[in-house]
Amino acid sequence: MKQIVVLSSKGGTGKTTFAASFAALSQNIVVADCDVDVAGLHLLLKPEKAKFKQEFTGSKLAFINKTLCVEREECEASRGIKLIWEKVLDFLKD
Amino acid sequence: MMIISIASGKGGTGKTLVAVSLALSIENVQFLDCDVEEPNSHIFLKPKILERKSVYVSIPKIDENLCNHCKKCSEFCEYNAIVVVPNKTIVFPELCHNCGGCMLVCPQKAISEEEKKIGVVEKGFAENLEFVGGRLTVGEPRPIPVIDKVKNEILPNKNVIIDSPPGTSCPVIASIYGCDYCILVTEPTPFGLHDLKLMVETVKKMNIKFGVIVNKAGLGNKEVYKYCREEKIPILLEIPYSRRIAELYSSGIPFIKEIKEWKNKFLSLFKDLKESLTS
Ligand code: SF4
Ligand code: SF4
């Protein structure tokens, strides 16, 4: 099995176009769209219904139990955990 | 004074071009390049860099004389950045997210921190604007600390223009967080539309006001316009798909410098935004 990776650091240079063209010309091929953030290959290759679909879980999400939290200095001071938390909470609340 | 960020889900839609054009069209500007993985606004702006600050993150350091290999640290670490083997405790700096937790849980107080350089923040001037740009060292996996350091330089008395990285994930969130307005740059193609939708979802969740600039207008189809109309998203400006603009772009010249009417367009866009935000 040979693996070919199509890369470019600048956006919009034609990675997806190139990958799709290669895919269209090859037989017996597995195509992986690893641009999981803003995927686009499916727009060109139009894959039929997914054979399987699986939820992906990454690392655990921390939460603060407000009734137990004593807001210790280290927590707030060490790299602004509180600040990050405000960011996250902000982001999650609709 | 306001903070305007320029973002787009898709890469290569013209974020940097728009950010630079806007910055060069208005007064009293501080320009922030937050695309620290692939910064290239300097190609247009050619800033004179007067100051360079290294960006460090703290990485745990194990004192093997104190460590009794109890594994508390590796059990705690969510990122598998510490591994304890019978006679050694090993840190993987690339995996560490600098949470400091292992240090807190170590019963032997065997963990301290050491600094690791992951990038640099550059400050200087380009024409009439103040320039701040971040650069992540090649091979370093986490851009956020560099982006945060760039944003720490924000001056309150300036109109701040932020060139954000592409995508919709953490580096983008860190770049546009706290801005007054977000300009989403897209192109009228199925790819542009697809990624615009993702970006719209993101800014909506973050409660940031936003509008769209269509670059390479005339190319592709009308779906982006249809979507914006249906979602009541304002289209602030259209930049045509023109040979002249593309030629200037490929020579590293912002087109507003050569085609003067565009400077006025960006200026009035800025004024409109300012009015809509203060009213
Ligand atoms: S928690 Fe401390 S003592 Fe235990 S293995 Fe980790 S570094 Fe060593
Ligand atoms: S600082 Fe946090 S992420 Fe890094 S090794 Fe320690 S527990 Fe893991």
Image: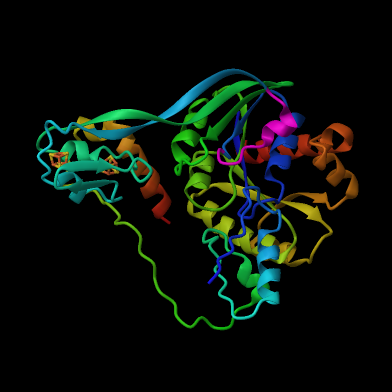
Residue A64 shown in magenta = no
B124 left or right of B148? Answer: right
Viewer-nearest residue: A90 or B161: B161
Is residue B38 one of those drawn in magenta? Answer: yes
Tell me where the magenta segment starts and ends, as one range. Answer: B36-47
Q: Position of residue B106 (x, y in %)?
A: 14, 38
Considering depth in this image, is B261 or B72 the residue closer to the camera? Answer: B72
Q: Quadrant of the C terminus of chain B?
A: top right
Which residue extends farthest top?
Answer: B50
Residue A53: x %, y % from top left: 44, 77
Q: Is residue B153 visible?
A: yes
**Residue B233, relative to residue B86: is it above or below?**
below
Report the label total: 0
Residue A68 appears anywhere in the view: no
Which residue is painted at 51% across and 81% down in the image? A50
Q: Residue at x 72, y 47 (%)?
A: B14
Picture coordinates of residue B188, whole percent (x, y): 75, 60
At which x and y percent is residue B241? Answer: 84, 53
Q: Quadrant of ligand 2?
A: top left
Asked if A32 appears above or below A67 in the picture, the reply is: below
Q: Residue drawn at (51%, 31%), measured in percent from left and top? A: B151
Task: Give left or right: position of B68 versus B39.
Answer: left
Residue A54 location, quadrant: bottom left
* Residue B111 falls in image quadrant: top left
